[in-house]
Image (tube, rainbow, N blue to C red):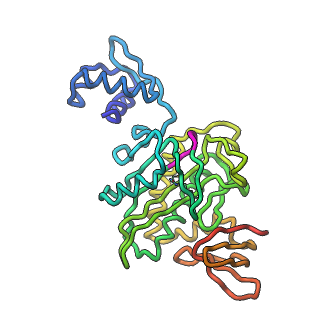
Amino acid sequence: MKVKILKVLRESGDYVSGQVLSKELGISRVSIWKHIRNLKEDGYVIEASARGYRLVSSPDLLLPGELQGWEQKVHHFWEASSTMNIAKELAKRGVEEGAIVIAESQTRGRGRLGREWLSPKGGIYVTLILRPKMSPIYAPRMNLMASVAVAKAIRRFFGLKAELKWPNDVLIKGKKVCGILAEIEAETDVINFVNLGIGINANNSISRYEKGATSLKEELGKEVSRKEFLNSVLKEINQQQVLLTKGGLLEEWKSLSATLGRDVRIVAPDGEIIGQALDIDASGALILKSEDGSLRSAICGDCIHLS
Ligand code: BTN
């Protein structure tokens, strides 16, 4: 209901009387008043006068009413252990494709390879629940898709030269600004769900323990509008999902890559490969020319740029 009230106030741009709101939304004026009080507690500035209510300003929070077109799909938390945990529960319970779990901060944010993802307020912590109709062997493409979308949104929205480090880190000037974590539940040939976790260092300060990391605020020297930027990331994800089915995603990834052409070290659970990164294949694996001249492919692991 809060989302609906905001929509009416936004569309009007002026005062809307309690009576009109109550008639349009089919609830009592007392309920309207309670929802308005609630919105004010969330940080919305709403003026109340004899003429009714007027929306003066909205907070930079990732609340459902701030994500145009996604309002009904957003599950917003002020604080969560990890949006991945909540998304897993929701996905198992059959929540619709495209649902989004958002937290303003996380107490146990998870990164790739069992690492921690520091998640103080000011960052963007989102998990998208997707049910792509593709063979599980192509599931890593979902990560590529998300990293392409974030890099393109950073370029378009802020004019910063975001690049990709295999498998799916987004870098600015060689420093990590966004990480992506995918959790998949699949049977032999069907994907039940892919939960795509996206963590973006937006307005959060980078601790001295996070070597090689940066944030949008640090790169721009000022705070960014997280809600406007997330709107643009979500729009880009929609566009990239089309490329995922029509083809063209791998080309997009390659054109943004900071890894291809470089000497790299891949540290994977089953060993280490050193070589020159030549290409990625249809499943997102990195193809390398190793030191002895043979071609090797890396499916997962950490990538360290050596040159
Ligand atoms: C990485 O290690 O690079 C991946 C980091 C992924 C972090 C995001 S934040 C939203 C979602 N919830 C989590 O606990 N992790 C992912």
The residue drawn where x is 59% and y is 46% is 157
Task: Please provide the residue range marked out in magenta.
Answer: 120-125
Name which quarter of the figure residue 290 lies in.
bottom right
Quadrant where the image shows the N terminus: top left
The verdict on residue 245 being magenta is: no
The verdict on residue 123 being magenta is: yes
Quadrant where the image shows the C terminus: bottom right
x and y percentages locating residue 182 in the rendered image: 49, 63
Vertical relation: 18 (above or below) 149: above
The residue drawn where x is 40% and y is 54% is 87
The residue drawn where x is 39% and y is 58% is 88
Vertical relation: 151 (above or below) 140: above
Vertical relation: 57 (above or below) 116: above
Residue 276 falls left or right of residue 40: right
x and y percentages locating residue 129 in the rendered image: 40, 57
Residue 33 falls left or right of residue 201: left
Q: Residue furthest right?
A: 307
Residue 215 falls left or right of residue 34: right
**Quarter for ligand 1?**
bottom right
Q: What secondary structure is the magenta-colored segment mainly? A: loop
x and y percentages locating residue 62 in the rendered image: 47, 40
Name which quarter of the figure residue 212 lies in.
bottom right
Viewer-closest of 152 and 77: 77
The residue drawn where x is 54% and y is 46% is 124
Residue 54 falls left or right of residue 203: left
Total marks in image: 0
Q: Residue furthest top?
A: 50
x and y percentages locating residue 224 in the rendered image: 60, 39
Viewer-closest of 294 and 265: 265
